[in-house]
């Protein structure tokens, strides 16, 4: 019957013939790999490789999510910094506005010098500093002569003009850092550090001359007090006021003497 296989060939014989045929095909085509049945180890390697690829993909996705979150965090931090800067700028503006309001509340609206309360507080700071540093400090108490008469004869606007002229003349003749405050209706107080009484008296002589030469032709009477040990601001003001009263008394006595001499002549 020749080489034709019979249906009764056992499976092993058929497998051997198939393997032989495959080998003949490989020999006919050397570039074709021979088929080999897969082993359990090869399948495990394939599964492990696939698992590694999936893990790597998951790691890349996680890293991308981390980068996205980091970018979002940076943007949020940048916005928070910008908001903080805006709040700081607003707070600075508010402080500056409050300082301007406070400064305005401490200034006398007519004469543009310090009000009494704020001025006495500043005077006390000058006193404390002079005590601490062992420096000289002179306080002058100024009374505007004849303000009531000006108000009664020329009107209160003329009186206001006289007060403003006195304040302007004080600021013009004194130093920029000398304190000038309006103590009462027609009274001013000045604090002059780093100088002695002789120089201060000459400076107020200049004030009187300049005021008399101005358009109001006003005049002032001044009392002085030098800082002493343990003096407070109120102590200095009290002594300067007492010196002014003594000066007025002397002026009154001189005026009486002049009138008496005029009558006798």
Image (cartoon, rainbow, N blue to C red):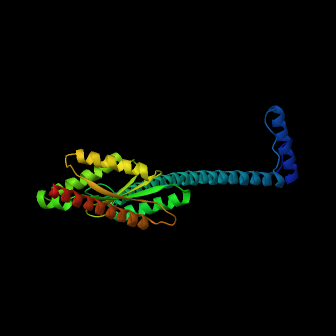
User: Which quarter of the rendering shows the C terminus?
Assistant: bottom left
Query: In this rendering, would 42 be left or right of 144?
Result: right
Res. 149 image quadrant? bottom left
Q: Find residue 243 and report its horizontal and vertical position in percent.
A: 36, 62
The residue that appears at 86% across and 41% down in the rendered structure is 20
The residue that appears at 46% across and 58% down in the rendered structure is 126
The residue that appears at 55% across and 54% down in the rendered structure is 73
Query: In this rendering, would 74 be left or right of 104?
Result: right
Closer to us: 146 or 264 = 264
Q: How many marks?
A: 0
Q: Find residue 187 and report its horizontal and vertical position in percent.
A: 29, 61
Using the image, determine if residue 259 lies above or below residue 208. Answer: below
Using the rendered image of the protein, determine whether residue 108 is visible from the camera's viewpoint. Answer: no
Using the image, determine if residue 70 lies above or below residue 152. Answer: above
Using the rendered image of the protein, determine whether residue 255 is visible from the camera's viewpoint. Answer: yes
Closer to us: 142 or 251 = 251
Q: Find residue 86 and report its horizontal and vertical position in percent.
A: 44, 53
Using the image, determine if residue 208 lies above or below residue 94. Answer: above
User: Which quarter of the rendering shows the N terminus?
Assistant: top right
Q: Find residue 244 and report its horizontal and vertical position in percent.
A: 33, 61
Closer to us: 173 or 79 = 173
């Amino acid at each position: 019957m020749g080489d034709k296989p019979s249906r009764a060939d056992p499976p092993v014989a058929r497998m051997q013939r198939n393997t032989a045929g495959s080998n003949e095909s490989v020999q006919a085509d050397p570039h074709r790999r021979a088929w080999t049945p897969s082993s359990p180890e090869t399948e495990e390697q394939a599964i492990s490789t696939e698992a590694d690829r999936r893990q790597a993909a998951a790691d890349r996705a996680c890293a991308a999510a981390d980068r996205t979150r980091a970018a979002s965090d940076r943007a949020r931090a940048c916005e928070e910094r910008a908001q903080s800067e805006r709040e700081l700028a607003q707070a600075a503006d508010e402080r500056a506005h409050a300082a301007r309001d406070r400064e305005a509340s401490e200034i006398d609206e007519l004469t543009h010098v310090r009000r009494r309360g704020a001025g006495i507080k500043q005077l006390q700071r000058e006193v404390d500093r002079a005590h601490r540093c062992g420096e000289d400090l002179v306080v002058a108490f100024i009374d505007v002569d004849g303000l009531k008469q000006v108000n009664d004869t020329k009107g209160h606007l003329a009186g206001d003009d006289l007060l403003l002229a006195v304040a302007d003349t004080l600021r013009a003749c004194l130093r920029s850092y000398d304190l000038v405050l309006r103590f009462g209706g027609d009274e001013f107080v000045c604090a002059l550090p780093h100088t002695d009484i002789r120089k201060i008296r000459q400076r107020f002589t200049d004030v009187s001359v300049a005021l008399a030469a101005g358009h109001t032709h006003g005049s002032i009477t001044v009392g002085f007090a030098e800082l002493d040990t343990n003096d407070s601001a109120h102590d200095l003001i009290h002594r300067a006021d007492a010196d002014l009263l003594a000066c007025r008394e002397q002026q009154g006595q001189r005026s009486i003497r002049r009138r008496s001499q005029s009558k006798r002549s």
